[in-house]
Image (cartoon, rainbow, N blue to C red):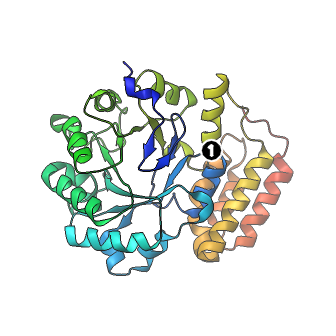
Amino acid sequence: MQSKKQKDLPKIGNIELPDFPLLLAPMEDVSDPPFRKLCKEQGADVVYTEFISSEGLIRDAAKSVVKLDIYEKERPVGIQIFGAELDSMLQAVDIVEKSNPDIIDINFGCPVKKVVSKNAGAGILRDIPLMVKLTEEIVKRTKLPVTVKTRLGWDTGSIKILEVAERLQDVGIEAISIHGRTRVQMYKGEADWKPIAEVKNNQRMHIPVFGNGDVDTPEAAVKMRDEYGLDGAMIGRASIGYPWFFKEVKHYFKTGEHLAPPTMQERVEAARRHLQMAIDWKGEKLGVFETRRHYTNYFKGIPHFKEYRMKMVTSDEAADVFAAFDEVQEKFGDFQFA
């Protein structure tokens, strides 16, 4: 059942968004500036940084600080922070504000053990009063719109997302993104969007409610929009090494037809630009290393490709990776993707 509020175009604070926007999820070691730029070019409406440790930021840890880098061309951009200590989170907000993002997002959803064990990420779903208190104080601390990304609950016996969303809205958040799994599920099984739709259809809710989890085909995005009545989709894993996903979803919205997949030339060009931007941002060594995880998806489905993929993911020198791209273009240039 769709809610009547669906007709209004979603807004995050004063940021006006199109009908059913597509948001790039914050993904650790994935949602960096080069990748965000590629996704933006392909139609992502809002992009989020990978999550940043509040403790790391206030210690001035280089790994955390470099994640604050944002570029004008990717706006609107949200910087996502995580932590469970109020003082650290507030100091982190002050540091984040200096980078001048459009949005500050709080991660209350990361299921990874090293985060959860400190009561941060999805760990805070076991202490909802603390979750609400932290959010309230962060909202008071900043002039920027604050959004939250979370999960349905800690486990299936403690799904209180209806109450959580209301309470977070009451203390001033401007949008909520909900992953349709519990923390205990991690990424297993199927995402359940029904509780997210219940949040959206709650008459007390007036902020945008974005769905996350298993939006991996254009049809899934349509289902989330039309059957579940959500305000937008946050897309994570489907976009890794495949920034064209955003464009494909939007084309499907408009025409009901599937866009032809990107050609080999487009894929090689994207991989080449991705690597070059990563090198420009972090230097050759890290740029080469951190872009590796994307290549499998850039060149998925090509037979007899292993030798070339191995060159891409094992070469330490940028020149060798660029040479592998050239070889692929030459050898597989006419390959037709299904």
Residue 18, quarter of picture: top right
Badge 1 local density, few (<14 within 10 Å), some, or many (20+)? many
Position of 268 relative to 1 (above/below): below
Q: Nearer the viewer, residue 330 or 29?
A: 29
Q: Nearer the viewer, residue 60 or 291?
A: 60
Residue at figure coordinates x 40%, y 39% from the top left? 210
Report x, y in % for residue 302.
71, 42
Position of 253 relative to 158 (above/below): above
Residue at figure coordinates x 42%, y 47% from the top left? 12
Q: Amino acid at mark 1?
A: Gly
| Residue on which the image places disc 1 | 43
Q: Nearer the viewer, residue 220 or 264?
A: 220
Please state if 300 lies on the left or on the right of 76 as rendered.
Answer: right
The reply to whether residue 157 is in sight is yes
Q: Nearer the viewer, residue 92 or 190?
A: 92
Report x, y in % for residue 66.
49, 74
The total number of labels drawn is 1
Residue at figure coordinates x 27%, y 70% from the top left? 90
Residue 255, quarter of picture: top right
Report x, y in % for residue 235.
49, 43
Please state if 43 lies on the left or on the right of 122 as rendered.
Answer: right
Quadrant that contains the N terminus: top left
Position of 207 relative to 292 (above/below): above
Report x, y in % for residue 244.
65, 43
Quadrant that contains the C terminus: top right
The reply to whether residue 24 is in sight is no
Helix, strand or loop for disc 1: loop
Please state if 104 lies on the left or on the right of 311 as rendered.
Answer: left
